[in-house]
Image (cartoon, rainbow, N blue to C red):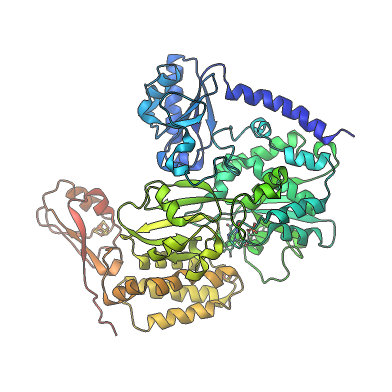
Amino acid sequence: MPDALALYDAMRANADAAYAAWRNPERPRIDVAIDQSSISNGALRTRAAIERVVSARNAAIDLGRVHGYGIQWLHPLVQVTFPDGATVLYGPVTPADAEAIVDEASGRWGAAASLRIGMVTGERDGVPSLRDHPFFALEPRERRLLRNLGLTDPESLEHYIARDGYRASARMLGRHSTEDQIRTVMNDAGLTGRGGANFPTGVKWNFLFGAAGEDHYLVCNADEGDPGAWVNRVVMEGDPHLLIEGMLIGAFGTRSKQGYIYLRDEYPLAIARMEQAIAQAEAAGLLGEDILGTGLTFRLRVIRGAGAYVCGEETGLLSSIQDSRGMPRVKPPFPAQRGVFDKPSNVNNVESYANAPLILMHGSDWYRQYGTERATGTKIFSFSGDIARVGFMELPFGVPLAKVLEVCGGMVGGELKAIQSGGPLGSLLPPQSLPKLILQGDSFSPWDAIMGGGGIVFCNDKTSVLVLAEMFAAFVEEESCGRCTTCHGGNQRQTEILRRIIDGRGRREDEPNLKLIDRTLQFSNCVHGQFSPKITRNLLQHFHADYEAALRGEDPSLTMAGLYRVVVTNQYDPALAEAVAICPVDAFRGPAGNRSVDDAACIRCGACIDVAPKAVGKQAKARTVALN
Ligand SMILES: Cc1cc2nc3c(=O)[nH]c(=O)nc-3n(C[C@H](O)[C@H](O)[C@H](O)COP(=O)(O)O)c2cc1C
Ligand code: SF4
Ligand code: SF4
């Protein structure tokens, strides 16, 4: 029987050679960061423009791709690697900058100086190291989960292997580790689930290992539906083999032969990269049948999500994998007892699995070097909202959130009004919580809040917390699977009440009714129903003054539909005609020079203000119904 480590070493030698040639190319190479965020910011147009310039000049330059580094407010990102291995990162690079980038890559150093962000590797006079950028001040100097971003082509198996990829699993197989050893090291590391509930991953693996029968299934929850969270997407688009290797280790530790990655359909690039990586790993003998000649089997498949938020709940997800409706069911039985196709299964988040190769490679003590006693290791977070620097970071647990806001460049457009964590089933925290919050789940508990899966949104004081609460209430109502009357009915009532309040028709009895709905929702079957009133509860707990003001008909944010009207502010602005033309309900009245907006007809879509901000504006208006 061939030795697994010998097979790996042979693969590694080829990978090292390929990676060395990529790191120190014979001629300069321009890599455009291609990931979903970059694409949304025009990366494909930038790449096309660079390709055109290179081809028109017949320049001695190669083109390639990387994944973005986390500094997403500077997208599109482009990096140039020179033959000495030095890599310079530039951004934001628009199509108009293509000439300058090609000039600089061709040796006209200085042509793109104003676009330089920092050195990814190597040195150039006057260009700081990227790791010294203030945005990364709180990250470990050496990234762990994000270690390959910007330093590999995410579509290359060789690059992953050359950076120690699949080494932990080859050692596991080659040195004949036992399943118990694998699960023990995960438990010793203190790895907990990254999907939000923080349940110890190794303990879950113990459940599946100990489950009856031979047919065990390993499932990855890649449904990531929380607005403001794109943590799992970064792993799958940036380093897909890390997830595959993590699942391979999990499969070995739990004796699973079949795995599924349930991946939300709204992540097309992640789907493409995961499917490609699975095919590569199978072709290399790292996945599928007879892995590295050991006789071990682990087949892995991507299942495209059904587009419902509630399919992220693990039993709803298992049901959806089987082509049934994605409806959460009563637990017990838990997935380890009865999971997909009624067989024992384990469901973990993408990031939970992605930690496994690192823990196995470096050991539990290494893993615990970062984080706190109660939350070990690092975690990827995505930060967004009204902040100067939107992006993602890998941070040790325990970092103060106030420091995070600092490295994100602080608030823009106003003071901090609210912190939204954990998505629609999560929380709304007041500004006074900021100095006390650290990135660790239990630090959020005193505020009746959760940290969640890693998406944190900072909202400025132009935000109405009532409008925010109504938006999330409408979302959880829409996403209720409909099984429980408490959940589908309760969420309808919650949304109706909040909608009426922002329409300027709130009532005194609304608050006790919202609290009654909250209590009733606790009788729902799954966490979706039980957590769905959390944001409204936080609104009443932490933003009561805003709630009371809204009842009185006051809305300083001018975003509550019933408490402002749209008015013409400048009859002579030439853009006013465009505003009149764009109105979808023909709410403008009167001839040119004497225009007005019919308040009853206006649906507050805001289109006229977008096209003519100096001609049309908002004006506060009082409640039209007396407060009882
Ligand atoms: C409505 C709803 C949506 C959820 N969505 C996700 C999700 O997108 N990703 C995820 O990992 N967990 C999600 N969860 C939590 C999962 O049910 C489950 O706890 C998690 O996948 C377990 O993985 P972990 O132990 O690695 O965190 C969701 C839960 C609920 C109630
Ligand atoms: S609580 Fe809501 S989402 Fe969960 S099973 Fe009941 S109706 Fe479905
Ligand atoms: S806000 Fe929308 S509906 Fe109202 S006047 Fe402007 S364009 Fe028309």
- As rendered, which of 541 and 75 lies closer to the eye? 541
Task: Mark yes or no: residue 360 visible.
Answer: yes
Residue at the (40%, 56%) spot, across then down: 458
- As rendered, which of 305 and 294 lies closer to the eye? 294
Looking at the image, residue 76 lies above or below residue 219 = above
- Which quarter is ligand 2 in? bottom right
- As rendered, which of 114 and 67 lies closer to the eye? 114
- As rendered, which of 615 and 89 lies closer to the eye? 89
Give the total of numbered labels.
0
Which quarter of the figure is the C terminus placed in?
bottom left
Q: Residue furthest right?
A: 1
Residue at the (25%, 63%) spot, across then down: 602
Looking at the image, residue 213 lies above or below residue 523 = above
Task: Mark yes or no: residue 448 visible.
Answer: no
Looking at the image, residue 480 lies above or below residue 615 = below
With 581 as the anchor, is 178 left or right in this view? right
With 91 as the anchor, is 604 left or right in this view? left
Residue at the (58%, 78%) spot, across then down: 523
Q: Residue furthest left?
A: 593
Q: Position of residue 203 (x, y in %)?
A: 73, 61
